[in-house]
Image: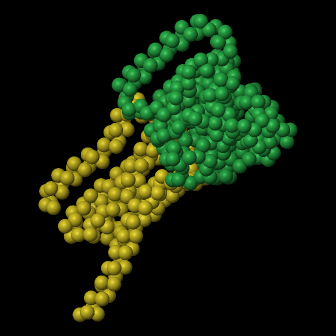
């Protein structure tokens, strides 16, 4: 894909990623969030955080499928930052609507409720990734170290899915879809490295 | 298209004695009502052809002193925000999927430790006692609440008719579990049929309602048609829906959520702001239908019914028997 087309597409996608938020704000203003607006906002922001996280994780495996998809890498940072953005809104709904900014309530929740513990941990781990998402951070940290740090996103993905399983009632299997998608995206990396390592060792042997 | 599989109940069959005495006036009223209902149904079909599972049959009801005067949750919210896992785990699912529930013919079987073991026809039960309107607070364990004008009569009336033996200490309620009518029975991992239970004194308490309707009409499918139990001082899941068996037993019966997650749900499950659920603080509740920043209010012990029911638990450690 030509560089200019990618740039234009990036602008379009950047605005498109704001649409879920626009919809929530629209519904809040017109009072059409449904019977339980607090829960509706919480679910929407949580779902979008998870969707963007999976989208970020999908970039690399998709790119490896074909050289013609190399341009996808230019969207990874945007998706990652949007994942953090919606995760932060999700956290804000908890702090504001559920805890009413009460620090003791929040501390008690983090200690007692395991879904809150892992959810909060996932957000904390995303924080350094969002802070070092810009190009200067890669230069400053050096490519190797930056990459190592950003592997934390795998942990974030796993924690986010555990968070989802722990909030639904036992027996409810609605988090199954995202669990399978995450498993496929992580497994694709394992398969690729094994295959890649074998190719590298077999090349000198053939030569 | 509105799919109606059940035969409508002739309104004369569900007239309580008191109203029946006033027959002439009633008949005129009924004719007017019938015409209005028929017209409303036709208009309803034109305006909203996509169905939601409303049973829509008017009940003759009398007022009850047990009602609260608090603002009632809208019929729209009561019928579109449901936990009924046999019809899906999303709260918007049952309104769409519960149309497949067949509520006629329907029988409720009384069995176990009682002298009068039999299959009761739903239409016999419906007119067994006058239908009272009971406006109750309804508190879900997930931390939200509604105020609902139910219709029914005290479960104690039915229990007396079953003539339980002195050895019957508990009452178990079993819901329908038919995969042909309940599309999510296989995909949700629970021990079906849904089972709930009460201690005999809880079941005999006048507040415990054998429930046939809400907002003056027979129960919509997604709210547990054609008959359910309502125990207003306990979390919502204690109030079984679409009941087919009422069993009198000597021991505490297994209940659905206690079996599913014993560390999360106890047998008693009385509304109690001082006992936390592992996932939800029970100190406050979100009022369904209230605006975004005015949703939260404090939860009352026994859901505000402490004056009537606290004596049932005197001497019990409510933190242990949660």
* Relative height, residue A121 to residue B103 (above, below): below
Nearest the eye: B34 or B43: B34
Nearest the eye: B150 or A113: B150
Chain depicted in green: B
What color is chain A drawn in?
yellow
Residue B163, given in percent of the width and then of the height, sits at 80, 33
Q: How many marks?
A: 0
Residue B160, given in percent of the width and then of the height, sits at 78, 30
Quadrant the N terminus of chain B occupies:
top left
Q: Is residue A174 left or right of residue A25?
A: right
Query: Who's the residue at 35% across and 25% down the image?
Result: B46
Q: Residue furthest right?
A: B166
Query: Who's the residue at 59% across and 17% down the image?
Result: B12
Query: Who's the residue at 81% across and 37% down the image?
Result: B115
Q: Is residue B176 left or right of residue A49?
A: right
Residue B270, given in percent of the width and then of the height, sits at 70, 38
């Amino acid at each position: 894909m030509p560089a200019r087309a990618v740039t234009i597409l990036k602008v379009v996608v950047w605005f498109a990623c704001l649409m879920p938020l626009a919809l929530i704000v629209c519904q809040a203003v017109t009072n059409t969030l449904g019977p339980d607006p607090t829960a509706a906002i919480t679910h929407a922001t949580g779902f979008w955080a998870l969707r963007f996280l999976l989208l970020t994780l999908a970039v690399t495996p998709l790119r490896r499928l074909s050289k013609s998809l190399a341009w996808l890498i230019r969207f990874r940072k945007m998706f990652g930052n949007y994942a953090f953005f919606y995760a932060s809104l999700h956290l804000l709904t908890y702090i504001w609507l559920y805890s009413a900014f009460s620090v003791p309530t929040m501390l008690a929740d983090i200690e007692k409720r395991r879904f809150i513990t892992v959810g909060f941990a996932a957000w904390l781990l995303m924080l350094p990734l969002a802070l070092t998402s810009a190009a200067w951070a890669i230069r400053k940290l050096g490519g190797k170290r930056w990459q190592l740090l950003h592997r934390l996103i795998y942990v974030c993905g796993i924690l986010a899915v555990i968070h989802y399983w722990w909030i639904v009632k036992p027996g409810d299997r609605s988090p199954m879809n995202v669990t399978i998608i995450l498993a496929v995206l992580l497994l694709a990396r394992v398969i690729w490295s094994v295959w890649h390592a074998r190719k590298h060792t077999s090349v000198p042997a053939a030569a | 298209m509105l799919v109606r599989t059940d035969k409508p109940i002739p309104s004369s069959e569900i007239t309580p004695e008191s109203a029946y005495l006033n027959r002439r006036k009633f008949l005129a009223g009924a004719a007017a009502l019938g015409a209005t209902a028929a017209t409303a149904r036709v208009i309803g079909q034109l305006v909203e052809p996509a169905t939601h599972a409303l049973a829509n049959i008017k009940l003759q009801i009398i007022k009850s002193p047990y009602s609260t005067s608090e603002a009632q949750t809208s019929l729209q919210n009561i019928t579109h925000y449901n936990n009924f896992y046999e019809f899906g785990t999303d709260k918007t699912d049952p309104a769409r999927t519960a149309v497949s529930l067949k509520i006629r013919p329907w029988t409720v079987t009384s069995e176990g430790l009682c002298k009068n073991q039999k299959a009761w026809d739903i239409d016999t039960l419906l007119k067994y006692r006058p239908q009272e309107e009971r406006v109750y607070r309804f508190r879900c364990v997930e931390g939200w609440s509604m105020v609902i004008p139910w219709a029914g009569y005290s479960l104690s009336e039915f229990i007396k008719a079953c003539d339980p033996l002195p050895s019957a200490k508990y009452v178990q309620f079993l819901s329908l579990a038919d995969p042909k009518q309940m599309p999510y029975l296989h995909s949700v991992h629970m021990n079906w049929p849904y089972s709930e239970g009460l201690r005999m004194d809880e079941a005999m308490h006048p507040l415990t309602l054998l429930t046939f309707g809400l907002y003056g009409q027979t129960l919509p499918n997604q709210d547990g048609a054609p008959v359910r139990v309502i125990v207003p001082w306990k979390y919502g899941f204690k109030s079984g829906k679409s009941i087919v068996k009422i069993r009198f037993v000597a021991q505490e019966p297994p209940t659905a959520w206690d079996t599913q997650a014993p560390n999360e749900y106890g047998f008693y499950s009385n509304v109690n702001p001082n006992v936390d659920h592992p996932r939800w603080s029970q100190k406050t509740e979100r009022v369904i239908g209230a605006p975004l920043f005015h949703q939260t209010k404090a939860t009352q012990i026994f859901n505000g019914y402490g004056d009537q029911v606290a004596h049932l638990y005197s001497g019990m450690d409510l933190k242990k028997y949660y």
